[in-house]
Amino acid sequence: MMQKVEDCAVMNLRRTARQVAQFYDHELRGSELRITQFILLAAIQRLGPISISRLADFMGMDRTTLTRNLKLLGQEGFADMRPGEDDARTRIVTLTKAGITAVENTMPRWHQAQTKFLKAFGTKRWRQLRQELDSATAVVNMHSKL
């Protein structure tokens, strides 16, 4: 059976991710963060101080992309990277005061966006979709390690 490009999992997942991110960015307008910055900073706030490796695993990102994004957040004064205490090769990420303030200032708009999305899409449907996305991630991870 011939596959059609419009059925491509990557194309459809990325298109949906871009459009959902645009929705959240629209809802966050007026704040100092875009949704991609906010979710990364919020994860650091929740988990930090945290090593880049652990943060990459949590975010499902490769270390190179994450490091590049963290450098940009560092240049903006939101995050700080320092050598680990036990191993200087390990980089530990923390939020700066400006990063904490940016997350706290953006959080109400994120809650508004999340509520609006869940109301429109449906909380039950979101839970089901999230379970399916987690399953797809597990399958891909299992096959990529073979």
Image (tube, rainbow, N blue to C red):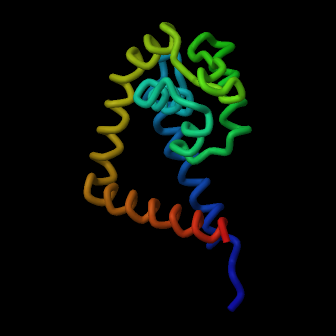
Q: Quadrant of residue 15?
A: bottom right
Left/right of residue 53 with respect to residue 89 in the rendered view: left
Q: Quadrant of the N terminus?
A: bottom right
Foreground: 24 or 41? 41
Along the horizontal axis of the image, is 32 left or right of 87? left
Residue 102 at what x, y percent from top left? 47, 14
Q: Is residue 112 above or below residue 136?
A: above
Q: Residue at x 65, y 66 (%)?
A: 145
Q: Quadrant of the C terminus?
A: bottom right
Q: Is residue 116 above or below residue 12?
A: above
Residue name at image x 33 percent, y 22 percent: 108
Residue 83: x and y in percent read 66, 20
Find the residue positioned furthest to the top: 97
Q: Residue, x 45% and y 66% (percent of image)?
A: 135
Question: Can you give x and y, in whole percent of width and height, for residue 77 in the image?
Answer: 61, 10
Q: Does residue 74 appear to the left or right of 95 in the view shown? A: right
Count all numbered tags in the image, as a single digit. 0
Write the residue at 33% across / 53% down: 121
- Residue sitting farthest toward the front: 86
